[in-house]
Image: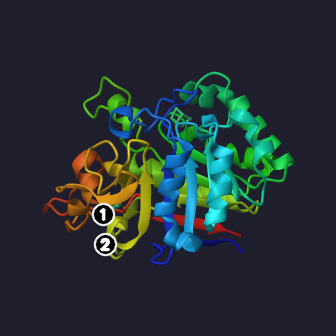
Amino acid sequence: MTASKTVAFSRNSTNLFFHILTRCNLKCRHCYINTEQHGKNTLPLSTIIAWLQAFSANSRSTNLIFLGGEPTLHPDLPVAVRHARRLGFASITIDTNGYLFGDILSKVDPVQVNYFSFSLDGATPETNDAIRGPGAFDACLSGIRNANAMGFATSMIYTVSSANIHELALMEPLLAELGVRRFFIQVIGLRGKSADQHSVSGGKEQLQVSRNQWLQTIPPVARQIARHGITVTFPKVYLNAEEKFECAGLVAKNFFIFPNGRVYRCPLCEDFPIHSLVFDNNKLAPAGRLNESDFFKLNIAEGCVMNKLIQPHNLIYCKDGTPEYKIACCLLKEEICV
Ligand code: SF4
Ligand code: SF4
């Protein structure tokens, strides 16, 4: 039996998205890394350890995700993983573009790393490499095969845009063949390079898909893929009038840490200097006001405040001026598993 459910924000667990550097070997078209806002530095191991320590009081209920840039470019990633394990984090994931630098698979083991999570944005080299760069498709597939062969659990992230939505259905046989356990479908957001490339008035590329395209494509393909025993997760995006809107910034514990010390609670805020927390001398402290936490409290008919501010063309209004639907928090997910 296939079960589909909206995953409520967990009040009891924390997710720590730790960008240990912003450097990367690729230049993906939709990369959300914005070095002006996130820094260009590679965190020294001592800083990584100090910042992990700052979140370690609730480590047993905290899921830690190492990200970049490309985190495997960090020479101290294996030591950081071992340290995080000693601190007792509930799970450790390494997000990667598949190049797996520094012979990482032989320097950590499946007891230390719960998941290697690979980013792929097309079911063919033509589509994926047009987005992520030449050779990225082959590197990713070979990284997944090598990780699986060494006993690691693997997951995959596919960021849906107008450039690759047509290949999402083709991911079904590929994922089944690769033996990936979890498949995360993301919606392209107007952050980082996507924001630069986007123009509602035309001229530049429109990367975001329409509501109809999203609703007609994503849930059915997700159900197809889940038939293979793969857990599929995708953002809810649209809420109808009866569905309750909640802002994760108020009710959940997600922290997005960047190498310049900024700590955000909301991914949609990451292009702006409105982080709510900051590492100051390795101590986590509240950032100056106004910041994102002031926006989270605003209660509007359209749902997510940040969506209305930075991507209002997602919204449609009825003749009486009320929104036709609400935009859910970008962190609210639908999960399908068998
Ligand atoms: S692999 Fe990730 S960090 Fe690197 S360019 Fe692509 S999206 Fe950005
Ligand atoms: S995406 Fe919107 S609803 Fe979610 S945390 Fe950010 S501001 Fe809140």
Give percent across and percent down for residue 260.
Answer: 38, 42
The structure's colour scheme is rainbow
**Residue lying furthest left:** 320
Mark 1–mark 2 CB contact (< 8 Å)? yes
Indicate which disc, 1 or 2, sits on the residue closer to the N terminus: 2
Quadrant (top left, top right, bottom left, bottom right) of the C terminus: bottom right
Q: Toward which corner of the image does residue 122 lie, by quadrant?
A: top right
Q: Residue 246, labelled with which disc?
A: none
* Whether residue 117 can be seen here: no
**In this orientation, which residue lies closer to the viewer: 201 or 254?**
254
Give the residue at x 57% y 25%. 130
Give the residue at x 73% y 30%. 138
- Within 10 angstroms of label 1, few (less than 14), some, or many (20 or more) residues? many
**Residue lying furthest right:** 149
- Within 10 angstroms of label 2, few (less than 14), some, or many (20 or more) residues? few
Q: Toward which corner of the image does residue 203 lie, by quadrant?
A: top left
Residue bearing mark 1: 326
**In this orientation, which residue lies closer to the viewer: 333 or 116?**
116
Give percent across and percent down for residue 227.
Answer: 73, 62
Residue bearing mark 2: 241
Give percent across and percent down for residue 83.
Answer: 64, 56
Give percent across and percent down for residue 234.
Answer: 53, 58
* Whether residue 279 can be seen here: yes
In this rendering, position of residue 247 left or right of residue 89: left
